[in-house]
Structures are given as C-alpha cells and as structure tokens.
Image (cartoon, rainbow, N blue to C red):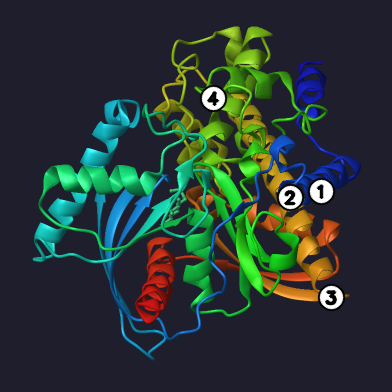
Amino acid sequence: AQHAERQRVLDTLRLSREQLLQVKKRMSEEMVRGLSKQNHEQGSVKMLPTYVRSTPDGTEHGDFLALDLGGSSFRVLLVRMQSGKRHNVDMHHKIYSIPQETMQGTGEELFSHIVKCIADFLEYMGMRGASLPLGFTFSFPCHQSKLDQGILLRWTKGFKASGCVGEDVVMLLKDAVRRRQEFDLNFVAVVNDTVGTMMTCGYEDPKCEVGLIVGTGTNTCYMEEMHNIELVDGDVGRMCVNVEWGAFGDNGELDDFCTQFDHIVDECTNNPGKQRYEKMISGMYLGEIVRNVLMDFTEKGLLFRGQLSERLKTRGIFETKFLSQIERDRLAMRQVRSILQHLGLTSSTCDDSVVVKEVCSVVARRAAQLCGAGLAAVVDKIRQNRNLNQLSITVGVDGTLYKTHPHFSSVMQETLQDLAPQCQVTFHKSEDGSGKGAALITAVACRVNNEGH
Ligand code: BG6
C-alpha cells in the first residue's frame, strides 16, 4: 500500500508523450512570438539578438581576455590564438570565488570585485597593466543593440546585486575599471554562455549551430535567419539568437505539468514566478525538488520511518553532484545508503535508499525530457527555416548537470529523436568552457572595428 501511495505521488512527475509534444508545440509558439515585432513584449521566451552573425571560420587570431560569469564558477582567462592555425589556441585561466554577500550586495561591489580579479589575474600572468580586448561571458538575459553593450533584463540563478537591472553591464564594468585606475579595456563583447559554447564547439565542428547549457541554469541559442528577426534591421544572412528559454512557462505554459513540489521550490527562490522551465530542469533546483518529495513522503510515513530530520529540512543539501552519484549505474544500494549518510540522513534503511534513488531518477528523467522537448522545437525551427526534409546539425553543450549525470544526456536525446524525427542531431560536449568562444567573437569584432577605422 505504501508503494502504491508513493507511486501516486511520483506519477505527477511523470510526463506522457502527449504532454511532451505539447511542450514542444508551446515552445515553438513562444519562439515565434519572441521574434515578432508586435508580440515579443508579451512572450515568455525573449529571443534576444546577439549580434553574432557567423560561427568561427578559423581565421580568428590575437590575444584576448575573457571573463566567465554566471555558471558554477567565475573565471578569468587569457586566450591566445594564432592566425590560420585552427587548433592552435593557448588558454590560461584562474577561478575566483564570488562571496554570497557580493552576489547579493550592490552592483558596484560586484563589478569592483570582478575588476579586482582581472587585476590579480594580469599580475599572475606577468601582464600587469596590459590593455587587451575582452570577451565577457555574462550569462544572464541582456538586451543588446550591438555586441559591446548588454542591458541586464533580470538576474537569475541566485544573483541579485542591486542597481544593475536596466543598466549596461559593459558600462558597469568600465566604470569599475576606471575606479581602479590600473589597466584599460579597449573593447568588450558581451556574450551569453550558450553563444560562447556554440562558438567554442563551432571552432572544431562547423556544423555546430546550436548552443545548450544544462548546469546551474539552462538555456539555448541557435542561428536564426535575419529575415525572421523582426527586431533587427536587415534581411540577409543569419544571426545567433539567445532564446532565454529558462523563462518559458512564466506565462503559464507549464501550469498543466507543474506539481506541488515545483510550486514550493519556486516560492522559496528569490525570483518566484520567474524562470519556471529552468526550475524544472537545471542543477540549482533539481535537488530541491527531490528534497521536497522526500519530505512529503516522510511526513506521510512513507520514508525514513516517518522521522523528519532537521537535516532533511535544510535547503540545498542535495547538490547536483549527489543526484549524479546516486543514479550512477551498478552502484550498490549500500553505497546509496552511504551517500545518504554523508548527507546526514543517518537513520535510513536499505528500503529508504531504493525509494530515494527512484525519486532522483523520476525528477532527473522529467528534466531531461522537458529539455529534449524544448530542443526539438529549436532544431525543427532551423529545419523549417531552411526548407529541409532532413536536417543534420550539431549542438554544443556545457553544464555540470549534463556532463556529470549518468542518464540525463541519453534521456534527452531519446526524447529529441522521438519528437523531432527529421533532425539528426549530434551533441558536442564543450571541454573548454565558453571563454574560448567569447574570445573568438571578440577577435572577429575587433577585426571588423579596425577595418572600419
Ligand atoms: C562552463 C561555461 O563550462 O559551463 C560557462 O564556461 C557556463 O560559461 C557553465 O555558464 C555552465 O555550467 P555550470 O554547471 O557551471 O552552471
């Protein structure tokens, strides 16, 4: 009876093929709405123009700084590319921490901290005071009207520094550089992490025209036809569009599929009601969904002998890495139990371990299927844009959840194949991060800028 009761709850987290087709259809509709001049304000999915008009061609060269802000770690990088040698890229980087107080303090504090890290990095590289162009991977929704400007539309993923929304992040960065009076930046390209990832992978695989992130947050970008992007003048060629699909569902598109657990998790974030799709898919939230299901089971006496521990009531204990570990194949239940003990859930029995593993698997499976359904909408749009019966394309992917979870990628691919059967999609895992791509974009922009002068 307990088993049946648990299954009844878990069934609310299982999606049928019909439901996934609905997700794909609604995502397609939102994408079209986001691209249109008339309706984009009402859309949940922002379809932001990125001013990146082509994937890499191998002629990019020069020395660049890159920043990578918005994922699980903040990095400063130096990227050196030799002309004409497609695979000759030399990269150095250093990871810096951003204290919670800085993430949630004032914008001035945040950007001063970033600039302090750049200064430290230049010192570390023996390049103190150097003035280099910079590719700024800034992975939050930004309105761009050119490459070297990005007006922050909203913070996501737990950031909330004050005084930044509505401001140009390039200006915020340049102001902070000026305050420090130690070095100069002569050009700054703002690049979303999806776009940086697409370019990083595109450097090796010219068929890579989609970027996907499944990490702390989730998002995608792809090469769209200029004539479909009504908000940018010109009809010729293509431009990369940052879909910002994390916000899908913010107008109720996912309400039919949301469970009580999704609602609780959403309400406990600092952006309730926002980024609903992201909150059902990405690493920052999956563990919280799992924890809430486990609490529900425990309260009903279906788990942990009905004993609700303080530990289980603690937010954030189920990090992405535990979800990935628990589901690893061939992992003996004894080992699952030791992971639970490590989490401080000490009174667990072997039966408890089986239940916890099943909850993790149901939650991760739903995430991967939702992500696959969204991606089906993206690749099918590209196929239709090009009037093709069959499309063969590569997706560049990054993000800790995608890279470390044992089943996420296979479930996502199965779903994608099922929902977009006319597309042959290859996944290219990014090993180099998005900073390399940001540098490639900066290289092209600098060349064009110099030619213009
Ligand atoms: C990194 C990219 O490898 O992956 C970042 O360089 C990106 O730009 C990140 O934001 C996403 O993954 P996670 O798991 O760190 O959020």
Q: Nearer the viewer, mark 1 or mark 4?
A: 4
Q: Determine whether label 2 and label 1 are within 8 Å by CB.
A: yes
How far separated are the C-alphas under marks 2 and 3?
A: 19 Å
Name the amino acid, label 4.
Asn
Name the amino acid, label 3.
Gln
How far separated are the C-alphas under marks 3 and 1?
A: 18 Å
Q: Which mark is residue 374?
A: 2
In what quadrant of the picture does the N terminus appear?
A: top right
How far separated are the C-alphas under marks 4 and 2?
A: 22 Å
Q: Secondary structure at mark 4?
A: loop
Residue 98 visible somewhere in the drawing: no
Q: Residue at x 30, y 25 (%)?
A: 105
Q: Earlier in the sequence, mark 3 or mark 1?
A: 1
Name the amino acid, label 2.
Gly
Q: Residue at x 53, y 40 (%)?
A: 283
Q: Which residue is mark 1?
A: 24
Q: Secondary structure at mark 1?
A: helix
Q: Which residue is mark 3?
A: 390
Q: Which residue is mark 4?
A: 271
Label 1 CA crowd tier, 10 Å (few <14, some 14–19, many 20+): many
Q: Residue at x 54, y 24 (%)?
A: 271
